[in-house]
Image: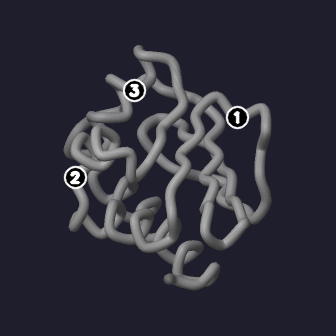
Amino acid sequence: MATVDECRKALHDLAAKLAANAEARGKLDLDRTLACRVTDLATAFHGRIAGGLLVDIADGDDPKAKIALIAASDDLIALIAGRLDITRAIAGRQITVKANPFDLLKLRKLL
């Protein structure tokens, strides 16, 4: 089981990766709040996706977030590191993403 600090670092790594790729892919028309709930650690993080970037990452849950990613700590880290395919993880119920279908299609472009 990963730690809270490792999960926090993984989210910041994801933000850096998205920032590095933003220019290559162009701006993504998506501005949504994001909650990342880590089930086995009973903790959560929240932030905002804006223009293809993940910004304003902070500790704590956002129950009103438009997009929620729910995963165990090891699965979250593997997903962000690219060792876990998001489609297979959702199909295998390793992770859950709560969002409207149009946002899910846009999110696939980010990952």
> In the picture, residue 18 is in which quadrant?
bottom left
Q: Nearer the viewer, residue 46 or 76?
A: 76
In the image, is 25 to the left or to the right of 7?
Answer: left
Q: Amino acid at mark 2?
A: Asp
The residue that label 2 is drawn on is 85
Q: Nearer the viewer, residue 67 or 19?
A: 67
Image colouring: one colour
Q: Residue at coordinates 61% horizontally, 69% vertically from top-left?
A: 40
In the image, is 56 to the left or to the right of 1?
Answer: right
> In the picture, residue 59 is in which quadrant?
bottom right
On the question of residue 22 being in view, the answer is: no
The residue that label 1 is drawn on is 65
Residue neighbourhood size for the residue with mark 2, other residues' Cα within 10 Å, grouped as few (<14), some (14–19), many (≥20)? few
- Regarding mark 3 in the picture, which secondary structure is present there? helix
The first of marks 1 and 2 along the sequence is 1
Q: Is residue 29 above or below residue 78?
A: above
